[in-house]
Amino acid sequence: MSRCGFAALLGAPNAGKSTLLNRLTGARLSIVTPKAQTTRARVRGVMMEAGTQVILVDTPGIFRPRRRLDRAMVAAAWGGARDADLALLVLDAAAGLTDAVRAIAGDLAAIGRPAWLVLNKTDRMRRARLLPLIAEAATLAPFAETFPLSAATGEGIPPLRAALAAAMPEGPFLYPPDELSDLPERLFAAELVREQIFLQTQQEIPYAATVETESWTERPDGSVRIDATVYVSRPGHKAILIGAGGARIRAIGAKARVALAEELGRGVHLFLNVKERAGWDSEAARLRAIGLEETG
């Protein structure tokens, strides 16, 4: 009998959840940047291990929400945890047990889902600190298993893969064995553009921008034309994002195009447009476009 189930990756911003998802699935499914709060919506990745299909749910980092977008992101994270067979609290071991981590662990214990603790980024800490950290973390919630690892280097990943496969319930596969994600290509394209905005701009610009794929046109030569719009909240943000003579947005588009061509395995013609749209992060349509539910 085959096994199949859901495991949600939960944690504070910048704990390395997206890096862990990509490492476990062996594919670039969730964008990764050094900045916190990069992930906005739930991303599902499929991991095959020992005849078992584990559907990994990468969730936005949990933080104190201030705007409607923030509330939708946090709701998506907790929704992923409640719907899963298993919740993995991913902790930045180098940062330790911050107030945010303690609060998340307490809330995780309250919802009553089976939970494991994943201590990520152990390559960035002194080994002498690891056992005391595990012992202290164990007091925060009833974690059934604990896995120290580094998603960046791959150290400690095989035991987690094996344990996840063994923990899934019996049942039929929900995705074809060769399918890695349910993320639509149009949303994936928008995410890779947003990744470059995070990497190539500073301060509040990445958090004040969103990207939507407006059209996806298959070309006779097998390549694809992608037209995407970047929405920003203020005129000043638009000017910074475009750059002098359009240099910044061209650089963002060039890097995103290369990444898309590599991931899609074919030629990509990417065209970006920047529009000011005050209050986009409070519009239900904009939230749905990036994979989030309206939260009021």
Image: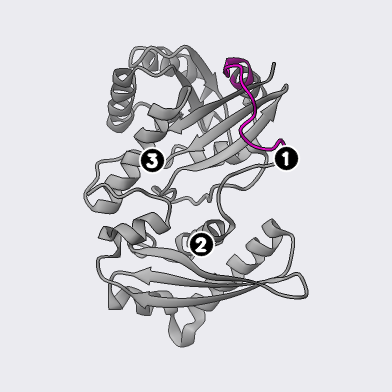
Q: Position of residue 95 (x, y in %)?
A: 40, 33
Picture layout, residue 253 above or below residue 43: below
Q: Nearer the viewer, residue 24 or 2?
A: 2
Q: Which residue is mark 3?
A: 61
The amino acid beneath tag 3 is: Gly
Between marks 3 and 2, how big is the CA–CA gap? Answer: 19 Å
Range drawn in magenta: 164-177
Tell me which label, 3 or 1, sits earlier in the chain. Answer: 3
Picture layout, residue 289 above or below residue 2: below
Q: Which mark is residue 178?
A: 1
Residue 258 seen in the current view: yes
Residue 16 seen in the current view: no
Residue sticking out furthest to the right: 221
Residue 203 picture quarter: bottom left
Q: Position of residue 229 (x, y in %)?
A: 45, 72
Q: Which mark is residue 190?
A: 2
Residue 21 picture quarter: top right
Residue at x-position 72% and y-position 71%: 223
Check if residue 15 falls in the magenta segment.
no
Q: Secondary structure at mark 1?
A: loop
Q: Which mark is residue 205?
A: none
Between marks 1 and 2, how big is the CA–CA gap? Answer: 23 Å
The amino acid beneath tag 2 is: Ala
Q: Nearer the viewer, residue 158 or 292?
A: 292
Is 57 on the left or on the right of 160, as rendered? left
Tell me which label, 1 or 2, sits earlier in the chain. Answer: 1
Between marks 3 and 1, how big is the CA–CA gap? Answer: 28 Å
Q: Nearer the viewer, mark 3 or mark 2?
A: 2
Residue sticking out furthest to the bottom: 245
Residue at x-position 33% and y-position 18%: 109
Residue at x-position 25% and y-position 52%: 68
